[in-house]
Amino acid sequence: MNKYKFVSWNVNGIRAVDKKEALKWVDEQDIHLLGVQETKSMKTQIPETIFNKEFKTVTASESAIKGRSGTALFTDIDITFECNCPTVDVLDEGRINEVHFTLGDKDIAFFNVYFPNGQSKEERLVYKMEFYDRFLNHCEALKKEGKSIIICGDVNTAHKEIDLA
């Protein structure tokens, strides 16, 4: 079976990363799928200059509130399905890219996720936990369909206080 390289990174603003040329290393890597979180942009605002490598598919999820959240997924793999999981990301915060593809004999559902942070207010913690429940239910349904699940992203969960810094 071929080996594939999947990379995930919270960029905290894809346009700022572009100005610093912080994704230029992608050009020198054999990456088959790159998931970035917290792009803080619409798909049309993702700079074409972030790297020179051309991917077959670029999918992005943008927040209904401009300049917040956002995810983008770049891949060379032939995908059979893509969506932004509106039944999970019910507040339309631009938090998920879901793509399906086949590798060997495996039918895969791949997720690039920027999970909500639950620190600011009690209601956000409730939303975060509900988001987790909806996401788990979605993944369980896909597993029942015979899909293998791969999840990458920023989980926004820390084991200890020191892990927050």
Image (cartoon, rainbow, N blue to C red):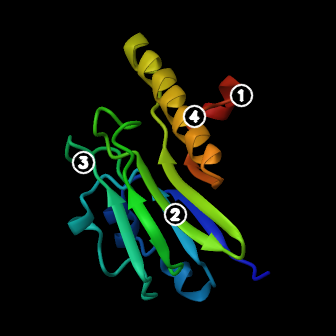
Say which residue appears at 52% left-offset and 63% top-offset: 100
Mark 3–mark 1 Cα distance, whole angstroms, equals 28 Å
Residue that label 1 marks? 159
Q: How crowded is mark 1: few (under 14 residues within 10 Å), some or many (20 or more)?
A: few
Residue that label 4 marks? 136
Say which residue appears at 38% left-offset and 72% top-offset: 58
As shown in the figure, which amino acid type bears the numbered disc 2?
Answer: His
Q: Earlier in the sequence, mark 2 or mark 1?
A: 2
Do callouts 4 and 3 mark residues in contact (Cβ within 8 Å)? no
Q: Earlier in the sequence, mark 4 or mark 2?
A: 2
* In the depicted structure, whether residue 46 falls above or below residue 131: below
Residue 79 image offset from top left, x and y in percent: 48, 72
Q: Which of marks 3 and 2 is nearer the N terminus?
A: 3
Mark 4–mark 1 Cα distance, whole angstroms, equals 20 Å
Q: What element carries label 2?
A: strand
Residue that label 2 marks? 100
- Residue 75 appears anywhere in the view: no
Q: Which mark is residue 67?
A: 3
Q: Which of marks 4 and 1 is nearer the N terminus?
A: 4
Say which residue appears at 42% left-offset and 83% top-offset: 56
Do callouts 3 and 1 mark residues in contact (Cβ within 8 Å)? no
Residue 38 image offset from top left, x and y in percent: 40, 50
Q: Which of 78 and 127 is in front in this view?
A: 78
As shown in the figure, which amino acid type bears the numbered disc 4?
Answer: Leu
Q: Is mark 1 on a helix, strand or loop?
A: loop
Residue 108 image offset from top left, x and y in percent: 61, 62
Q: Locate the C terminus by quadrant.
A: top right
Mark 4–mark 3 Cα distance, whole angstroms, equals 27 Å
